[in-house]
Image (tube, rainbow, N blue to C red):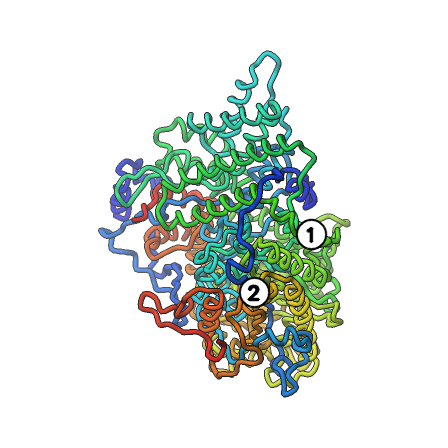
Amino acid sequence: MRDRAFGRRDLLRAAGATLLVPAFVREAFASPESVGPRLVVIMQALGTHQQTFWPDASGTSPILDPILSNAALRAKTVLVKGVTNETTGPGNQHDRGFNSLWTGVTPVGPPEDCFGGGPSIDQQLKRRLNPQVRFPTLNCGVLAAEVAPKNGHRRSFSYIGPQQQMPTRVDPYRLYAMMFPVTGNDSPDAVARRLALRRSVLDHAAGDLAALSGRIGPKERQKLDAHATALREYETRLSAAQSGMTCARPALPTGIDVTREDNVPVLTELMLDLVAVALQCNLTRFVTFQLGFCGNQWRYRWLGIDKDTHEEIAHVDWPDGSNDVAGKAVTAIGRWVAENVARFTRKLDSIPEASGTALDNSLVIWANENSNGVHDMSNLPIVLMGRAGGRLSRSGVVDEGYQSHYQLGTSVLNLMGVDAAGFGDKDGLEGRPASGPLRGLI
Amino acid sequence: MLLAALFGVVSCTGEIGDPLSLSKGRASPPAGPGGAAAVSSRDLRPPRVTPPALEPPPVDTVLCPSTTRQRARRLSLREYEGAVDELLKMSSGLASGFASDPSVHGFDNQAEALSISSGNFEEFAMAAQLAAEASNVSELATCVDGVAEHECAASFVAEFGRQAYGRPLTGIEQGELLTLFAEGADFEGYERGIRTVIEAILVSPYFLYRAEVGKAQKRSCSRLDADEVANAVAFALTGRRPDDELLARAASDPLFRSPDVLREEASRIVATPESRLHMARFLRGWLGVPDMHAVNKIPAAFPSFTPGLKDDLDVEIDLFLDHVLREENGTLEALLGSPITFASEPILSAIYANDYAPPLTPPDPPAPGAFIPIEFNPALRKGVLSLGGWLAAHAPVHRSSPVDRGLAVRSRFFCQTLPPPPPGAVATSPGPGDNNGTTRQKFEEHAKNAACRSCHQLMDPIGFGFEMMDALGSFRSTEAGFPVDSSGELTNTDVDGPFHGPAELADRLLASRQVRDCFVVQMFRYIEGRDETEADRCEISVLQQFFSTPETSIGDLAAEIIAQPRFSERSVEP
């Protein structure tokens, strides 16, 4: 192995040392709740245990109890039964559970390397609502990159366009460095000049990019356009980085190996904490969060499972619930995710805003690639939390029979303030059918 | 006749060199009627498992139009890091913390999947700052006493820029970079000025991408500039910017873009160690063994599969491929049929020990840390599909996998695309611990269920032929106390029939024209960085003819792809 001249620490230091911003630069952004609700989509992998997921007559369930036993959360939680991911196309149900649920379109590419076929809902929202925040979308998670080489397409469920995957940020240190750039000891004048120099460098790159874009055709140009957009956003962030300073910085324990599965519990907490802060401080609007990648093989040692939960647990958790060992393990995993979701939403609910709480002004979705461990995509476990800025008022279980993932996507767009008759391949545009929203939600 | 027809193609540019040079010095093999067009279909509806037989197109309609559109091709992360290291003369590991790029067909350089967006721009921007700060300015941009600093900066900009962009900078570009130098120097002196230039270059799209644009010849067709071609050649063969020799020839030889010159340059580069390394990366991607460290096994069941063994299996693949490329002339025959591999003591004991039943005697184990060439037991193993690394990578954590192995053979070696599992299909994969039969017996369930059978009959029977190799690729004659049945069968190919174990499969694959044809498609994807389309069929069939003889090497094929007239042309998007 060759020497590594730079490690993660160095990147952090570089960020700190160079993203210097003058204190007088202030963002003129609107307050969070006045610009429309935020969206957080949390994706779990490998399905759930249907028998212990849905609430019984008591109103709770072994998996969802951490959420539903909290009266405040329960009042802001809706479960949707009967949602089927109807996607066909390349890949198996692990692939399609991730690459299609939130794009609404048929995946592309060879079966072994199948990607989303169009923009995912976070990117659709970014495009349609164009939020003026430092990170219009934040695509993050834990251990999403630790994937077998042949499954590289499983690293993210967020797409800019066909095959154009948004990478998943899995390193809380890097995310932290981006969110909270360090001001150095330079004089205000030096800070200003350093910033001016950096802007000159970026302007130079933007000029090259424009020149290159002008020489190629419209399809190829789309990629460079995304690059140019990212460059502009970054430049804006450099100038406006100061706005992050008004937020309380969460404590960040040092030395956590972000590739080690045993660190998943602490990483999940940390990343979700950072997401909560990013939402609170109006640094971002649309968040995707993935626990591992679709079809992962976590062992959940911290839950005492210590088995390959893909091959040894999920795939033998028979749909009739008859495998007691597997069912218990999947229930424990689901409950662990529920604890994290509850912790995250409680945190949002504790943040007061001009009207209601941050949770009231958000939509937090917890979904899953599959409905059970054997590749089924019908009756997905869908949890909607928050009030979406007042657009969502009901709680409890929506049980209106069969509904499609197109309807789910439409409802989410509608809740975020987008007037849409459908989603993805059933968006009602250009002669395509319109799926309409979920029945029984609004 | 075919060649005459190709002349029609080159009328795209109107001034390509002698098109007949396509066959110079090379026996043009007769058209193989059995040659299959391995141009795979994106059509996913019916299981189209038999590629349409290629009727050589009627000669007077042969056209190889430019089928790659004008584009800016982003460097893969490996190419990017290598380029930074080469420029700054360091070993940075700069991209190690980046979000990794997805691969397609096993290749990490596929243009459509590589982009820069708000998801990863920050990484490139921060890396550029970091690398600029870490640069040794006094070495990179030496400025001796008596020379004005702006003159030092000017020569640095010209030379560093040329290396970074793989072409000479225009006067305007140099002027802009010198303005940045002046801004930095004005702030904090000469070093700051140079660092500012380095950062600007490392974050410029001309460094992060390579342009394939050229000058329009017709409304729908452009011809790449000589330096764009030089970059395309160099990246195709080495994954790096062009060397000085190639750039010099691009600048000075008016016939640089002719097939003759490109073939000559490609042949020169293919013989270099850098190119062999790059070809090995291509082969590893194609074979689905890019990195053994991502392969895991259940520790309790496979205690020998330690990180150390994974390291060794990676080295074994490197040594094996290098042997094939360097000493066996890089033929498919050697790749699929080599009678030897290279083993360390842990590999010998964990993977190959069971191969040598009396009267065979196992090789003497090498010294710790050393690798020795060993001969396979020829009855069991032959070629790359016998390597422990390939077999272990094509099996899940707890057992062998007829599905993974069968699918890999069908998709990667025959370029056949299988349809996805039908809606409602449930995975009933055998878990570990239920020792009530062999893996094969459990998977034979697929054959009983009509919904599963339609596709699994195309994978499992091939994979069954590997059953003598367990999840690590170690030979076994029994599994859970039951005798192992390794009879496999190839169907829907041009080499259909039964086989037993990897060695017999290798013989069949080597007899297959479809496999050779598919290999050509795979290399086309790697070099072009994209999927083939129907429009590529003509060129691919020419290449398939070229590659149809056993002695043609993988490197020759790469050079031949580069020597196609189309290589220097691009279509213009409407």
Viewer-side residue, B413 vs A369: A369
The outermost residue toward the bottom is A57
Viewer-side residue, A297 vs A243: A243
Q: Is residue B358 left or right of residue B232?
A: right
Q: What subunit carries mark 2? A: A
Q: Secondary structure at mark 1?
A: loop
Q: Residue B267's x, y, as percent? A: 46, 38
The outermost residue toward the left is B60
Tell me the residue that label 1 is attached to: A249
Q: What subunit carries mark 1? A: A
Tell me the residue that label 2 is attached to: A362
- What's the residue type where badge 1 is placed? Arg
Viewer-side residue, A170 vs B249: A170
| B528 in relation to B439, above or below | above
The outermost residue toward the right is B368
Camera sees residue B475: no
Give neighbour class at mark 1: few <14, some 14-19, many 20+ (Cα, 10 Å).
some
- What's the residue type where badge 2 is placed? Ser
Q: Secondary structure at mark 2?
A: strand
| Distance between mark 2 and mark 1 Cα atoms | 21 Å
Quadrant of residue A195 in the image? top right
Q: Earlier in the sequence, mark 2 or mark 1?
A: 1
Q: Residue B430's x, y, as percent? A: 62, 77
Q: Residue A89's x, y, as percent? A: 44, 69
Camera sees residue A106: yes
- Residue sitting at x 42%, y 29%: B249
Residue A23 numbered mark, or none = none
| B251 in relation to A430, above or below | above
Give neighbour class at mark 2: few <14, some 14-19, many 20+ (Cα, 10 Å).
many
